[in-house]
Image (cartoon, rainbow, N blue to C red):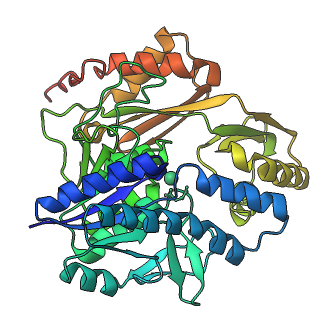
Amino acid sequence: MALIVQKYGGTSVADPDRMRAVADHIAFTRSHGDDVVVVVSAMGKSTDNLIKLANEVSDRKPGREMDMLLTTGERISMSLLCMALADRDVDAVSFTGSQVGIITDTAHGKAKILEVRGDRVREALADGKVCVVAGFQGVSTAKEITTLGRGGSDTTAVALAAALGADACEIYTDVTGVFSADPRIVPQAHKLTHINFDEMLEMAGAGSKVLALRSVEFARNHHVPLHVRSSFTWEPGTWVTSEEPSMEDPIISGVVTDASEAKVTVLGVPDRPGVSAALFEPLAAANVNVDMIVQNTSTAGTTDISFTVPLADMAVAEGIVADVAGSIEAAGVSHDNDIAKVSLVGAGMKTSPGIAAKMFRVLADEGVNIQMISTSTIRISVVVASSDLERAARVLHTAFGLDSGQAYSAPLPERR
Ligand code: ASP
Ligand code: MG
């Protein structure tokens, strides 16, 4: 008998029919004798709607009250789901994050989990009950209700799975798994049967929305195997585990696209110590998430610095950068909102040379201009014009053998 944590996202419980379908699946899992802990998100778009409502009422929206408001979404889901389970003669009990002892820090709106006590879940499981826990929420060390940031129910599920020593954490969503590319952009994209945590982390960091970044970090640190799958088809999805890729696995697992960033360039920056710090410290202090940074070599004592930030942070960044540019006597600032990031991710990159060269050649032959480049050991990202995004993603997907789901094997390095 296994202990399984099942997390159902907003689309999976969006309406009464979905709620009943989910209850059927929980009853089915239960009928195999497994223990089940369920984590639910708010129904459909209800979190967005609560935020809209708050915006209509108030300009200030104190963090504590926002969290009180937003946590109601998950309470609605958990209680309704328990009612649907009762109809199926499944003995189930709902709990808020606070009731199960999800202890967080005090950062309202983006709290971090410090500890999962889980006593009430353990007791209820011992009584033969299914536990349904509200996702995305906890209680702070100051005894206030907190939320974990958008998409935070994934993190709740993984944290509970880790604390309870669950055998697996199933993340049910509206897609059938993790794909080799976004199928809306690359129609030939295929579902991956498995991927490792490092690759999934890079994919999430590169803009893939399938799993919240923090939940993957948590799963990796606590060795919780994840199974991302669909609550609409119930077919097997993608396993995310710590397993290193084998020789037969493709070098590149996926092409990730992200059109949610903008580029800022500070022109004619004096080339002296402290200039970059002067620029990026105030951005960090304002919580602007700077992603790629490129500094040119200087000519005649000045240089250009370009970096990307989320489009959503652009308004804040713009003001700060204009101020700093003035004080460090830069020549000027320019912005480009029409950019996109295309990344190749694959654990096999570590051991096979020439991936970057091949990527740049493929893009060059397609006439795609590369504006910026950044790399990690298992990722290469480039910034291109947003009008080039689709083309770039498709040709890379093809060139690296992902269309057919076949491995791209690099030419063997020459013997020395
Ligand atoms: N309901 C929250 C949100 O929409 C948490 C989640 O869905 O994971 O962000
Ligand atoms: Mg959600």
Residue 142, compared with residue 110, is above or below; it is below
Q: Is residue 62 visible?
A: yes
Residue 181 placement, left or right of 372: left
In percent of width and height, residue 310 lies at 66, 46
Q: What residue is at 31 percent from the left and 62 percent from the top?
A: 87
**Residue placed farthest to the bottom in the image?**
142
Residue 72, compared with residue 327, is above or below; it is below
In percent of width and height, residue 276 lies at 71, 54
Q: What residue is at 52 percent from the left and 65 percent from the top?
A: 76
Residue 368 placement, left or right of 396: right
The quarter of the rendered structure image containing the N terminus is bottom left
The quarter of the rendered structure image containing the C terminus is top left
Return the residue nearer the eye: 381 or 120.
Answer: 120
Q: Is residue 226 visible?
A: no
In percent of width and height, residue 248 lies at 12, 32
Residue 76 placement, left or right of 351: right
Q: Quadrant of residue 399?
A: top left
Please state the total of marks drawn on the protein image.
Answer: 0
Return the residue nearer the eye: 135 or 199.
Answer: 135
Return the residue nearer the eye: 196 or 106.
Answer: 106
**Residue placed farthest to the left in the image?**
1
In percent of width and height, residue 29 lies at 19, 57
Q: What residue is at 89 percent from the left and 49 percent from the top?
A: 329
Q: What residue is at 26 percent from the left and 52 percent from the top?
A: 25
Q: Quadrant of residue 398?
A: top left
